[in-house]
Image: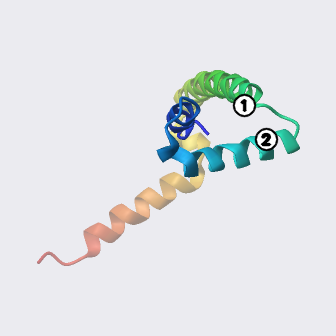
Amino acid sequence: MENLKPAEQSYRLGDIFFEDEHRKWVALEQELQAQGYSLEEVQALRRHYKEEYSEVCAREKVVCRELNTGKAILNSMIPDSISDGRKTEYNREIIRDRKEQPVR
């Protein structure tokens, strides 16, 4: 309806060129009314949920930063050899395999 608004206003001022747009406007307006809303209510709801979404996204960014900070602190406190015994063994195997491969 926002796209049709200028054409609807022109039609109401007497410009019959926009009759097709007017019919679409009326059909959409009736559909909104059948669902129990007006255009103003839908616009208000859209603004409300857009603001709420922005706030939730901002909170999510803060939580992700805090989580990453916590992970970094945890990783710095636990030595690699203790945190994952398989990790050091895996690294040794990679180094050994690299040494055994022929040089080209």
Residue farthest to the left? 104
Q: Secondary structure at mark 1?
A: helix
Q: Which amino acid type is shown beneath numbered disc 2? A: Leu
Image position of 86 with respect to 64: above or below = below
Q: Quadrant of residue 47?
A: top right
Q: Which amino acid type is shown beneath numbered disc 1? A: Leu
Q: Quadrant of residue 61?
A: top right
Q: CA distance from mark 2 to mark 1?
A: 7 Å
User: Could you tell me how many numbered marks the image carries?
Assistant: 2
From the viewer's perspective, tell me whether residue 79 is left or right of residue 94. right
* Front in this rendered view, residue 83 or 50: 50
Residue that carries the numbered disc 2 in the rendered image: 32
Image position of 40 with respect to 8: above or below = above
Residue that carries the numbered disc 1 in the rendered image: 39
- If the image is split into quadrants, where does the N terminus sit? top right
The mark nearer the N terminus, 2 or 1, is 2
- If the image is split into quadrants, where does the C terminus sit? bottom left
Q: Secondary structure at mark 2?
A: helix
Rendered residue at 38%/64% (across/down): 94
CB under 8 Å between discs 2 and 1: yes
Position in image of residue 95 (x %, y %): 34, 61
- Residue 91 — which label? none
Rendered residue at 52%/28% (across/down): 76
Rendered residue at 60%/41% (across/down): 82
From the viewer's perspective, tell me whether residue 51 is left or right of residue 38. left
Image position of 40 with respect to 97: above or below = above
* Front in this rendered view, residue 53 or 27: 27
Position in image of residue 57 (x %, y %): 61, 28
